[in-house]
Image (cartoon, helix red, strand yellow):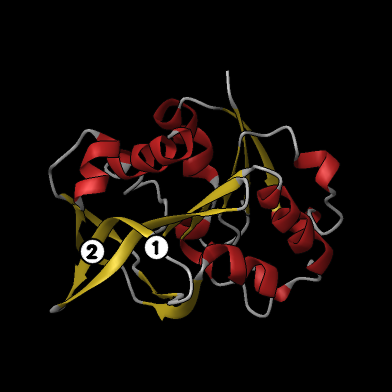
Amino acid sequence: MKKALLIGNRDCAGYMSIAAAEKALPEILGYALDTVCEDGFSSIAYEDIKDYDLIVFMPCDWKDRDNLDASVELFRYILHGGNMLIVGNGLDVGDRQELKVISASVYKGSSYYTELDIEPTDLGKKLSGCDETVTVRDIPHFVKPDVFKTSDLLYSFRYGSVSYPALFAQKWSRGKVACMALDLTSESICALAPVLKAAAAYFNS
């Protein structure tokens, strides 16, 4: 069975906590899951993570921690063939340039909980096996994809009259990165299963 490592925080606000993801992800993704809290992760080494098939990155305070070395090691993991799913608040990496590079996006901010329609693209339909719009209450995170890196858009969400990327992905060297601009909360995670499965299928493609 494939193995995934979840990086997050159990002690932050409920909507950013890893508790719901820790419970639901193994069944949704089909990965055995280990979990580590971001506050004890600054000394991570490539040797500690190289055997994981996937890292799910959803910390709530990464940008405020002394974790430059850990960010470099995560970058090394991707370049050597690792897969990373960057989720919600994990897209806000502050001045950690290595993680900005691999997400290939610029974080613009987030909004309050609201109802969102998450729509699959043709690629998202193919990868998830789902052609239906997913409606959830969640926190949308607004990102601007890097124009110098071509991303595969799998899902988008409507906010007002504008469409934003909800799940986009790209290849880096031997690795792959998918970015999900929504939080995995106890309220939304099961409804977002098709989106998560599209990310997993992208990694396996």
Provide the secondary structure element on which disc 1 rests.
Answer: loop
Where's residue 169, x and y in %? Answer: 43, 55
Q: Could you tell me how far apart the alpha carbons at marks 2 and 1 are, in whole angstroms? A: 9 Å
Locate residue 49: give its quadrant: top right
Query: Residue at image x 34%, y 68%?
Result: 140
Q: Nearer the viewer, residue 15 or 63?
A: 63
Where's residue 13, x and y in %? Answer: 52, 62
View extreme (top): residue: 1
**Against 30, is 23 above or below?**
below
Quadrant where the N terminus sits is top right
Q: Which residue is mark 2?
A: 157
Query: Residue at image x 24%, y 38%?
Result: 126
Q: Amino acid at mark 1?
A: Ala
Query: Residue at image x 32%, y 45%?
Result: 195
CB within 8 Å, label 2 to label 1: yes
Q: Is residue 121 left or right of residue 169?
A: left
**Against 80, is 116 above or below?**
below
Q: Can you tell which mark lies on residue 40?
A: none
Where's residue 111, x and y in %? Answer: 35, 76
Q: Amino acid at mark 2?
A: Phe
**Against 119, is 195 above or below?**
above
Q: Which mark sits nearer the N-terminus, 2 or 1?
A: 2
Q: Is residue 109 left or right of residue 80?
A: left
Q: Is residue 6 left or right of residue 150?
A: right
Q: Tag 2: Cα neighbours inside 10 Å, few (<14), some, or many (≥20)?
A: many
Q: Can you tell which mark lies on residue 181?
A: 1
Where's residue 69, x and y in %? Answer: 83, 63
Provide the secondary structure element on which disc 2 rests.
Answer: strand
